[in-house]
Image (tube, rainbow, N blue to C red):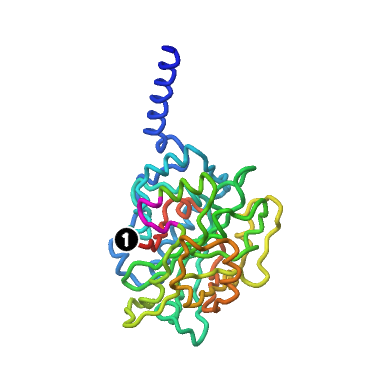
Amino acid sequence: MKKRTISFGVLIIALIATYSIVDLVIEPPATREPASVPSNYESMKACEKQDVLWSKIEESAYKELPPNREFGMFQLMAMSKQEVGIKGTNYSDFAPTGWKKYLHGRASIAKVKLVPVAGTKYTGLLQSGAECGLLRVSLTYKPTGSRPVAPGLAFKIFRDGNPSTNISALVSLDGQGEDYNFFKYPLSNIVPVGDGFGQKMVHKIFLTATKYPEELGAHEFGEMDVHGQKVAEPVSPRQLFFVPGPGLSFPSTPHELREDYAKIPAGTVIYQVFAAPEKYNSFNYLMEYQPANAPNFLKESEHIADIVTTSSFVASQFGDDGIFFRHQLRPK
């Protein structure tokens, strides 16, 4: 009995010690020092901000692609120690000192523009459009036997003299099995709550910042235009779908997706943006949204804009660890 007690005590001490240092010893490395930011960055014009970030992406472009990052128990433990609320409160386009990106750690970024559909009822950026933005495409983690291919995107639109507007989207928390065709399915800013252990743990971590971890807001898109002019009576969608552009398709067999992204030329309609009907603005997504709802909601949705590439995609160190895409979190 005494040996068992000692062994259990040693195990507890080992677990505590591991938890205390886990974020220091695993990938990804922390962005200990933020990238240099021009003192007048926030007051710059939208396209000037794009130029600043794009130069950092090009300067740190990988000559050889690093492997996708693992996501397992140690990464989950480290993530639980990070103040995830920063994802909603940091309005900078630059990652804060010490920030680590445990999910979507490897990515490619392209310059893009937002082209609204004529006659849309939505306001702000969805009506004015935007010539200068960035689109980051990535997998949530390295696919393994137990972890599926899980595509995601982060979209940033710059505004004159104001913080950027950002939104992120996923296919689902369950991913798409072993299919490596990144553009096989639409993505959305709202996905059903997951059932897996890891999904539940990530959900619990993000509950410290919001009661709705699986829903990211889109309201800012309708509140201000690209020139920083506020809209008196904003009209914004609640749910957006990002439908892959016509003809976009990758092989379904395992391969390096970042090599595929790099082949997409400027001028490509990379995503068509659809807005779910207003009747779903009062829908209880947290309790009632199921995987079967998504295709039905999309069928009823309205095509409101296109995201068009204005450069090639580039994989870079700054794009992996230095740039920051804020989440529009629903309040607790």
Foreground residue, 43 or 324?
Answer: 324
Image coords of residue 216 (percent x, y): 43, 63
Q: Residue furthest bottom?
A: 119
> Which residue occupies the foreground of this view, 320 or 198?
198
Query: If the image is split into quadrants, where does the C terminus sit?
Result: bottom left
Residue 210 in magenta stretch = yes
User: On the rendered structure, is 209 left or right of 278?
Assistant: left
Magenta segment main secondary structure? loop
Does 287 sit left or right of 40 as displayed? right
Residue 170 is inside the magenta segment: no
Depth check: give the residue in front, 272 or 187: 187
Residue 270: percent from left, percent from top: 58, 69
Q: Residue at x 60, y 75 (%)?
A: 299
* Magenta segment: 206-213
- Looking at the picture, does residue 68 appear above or below residue 5? below
Q: Position of residue 10 (x, y in %)?
A: 41, 20
- Residue 99 in the image: above or below residue 232: above
> Which amino acid lies under the numbered mark 1 shown in the image of this protein?
Pro
Tell me which residue sits at (41%, 57%) in the image: 324
Q: Is 42 rendered above or below residue 222?
A: above
For the view shown, which residue lies furthest in the top direction?
2
Residue 212, quarter of picture = bottom left
Residue 314: x percent and y percent? 54, 58
Disc 1 secondary structure class: loop
Q: Residues within 10 Å of mark 1 (few under 14, many from 20)?
A: few
Q: Specify the quadrant of the image occupied by residue 51.
A: bottom left
Exactly how many numbered labels are in the figure? 1
Image quadrant holding the N terminus, namely top left
Q: Which residue is mark 1?
A: 38
Q: Residue at x 66, y 67 (%)?
A: 248
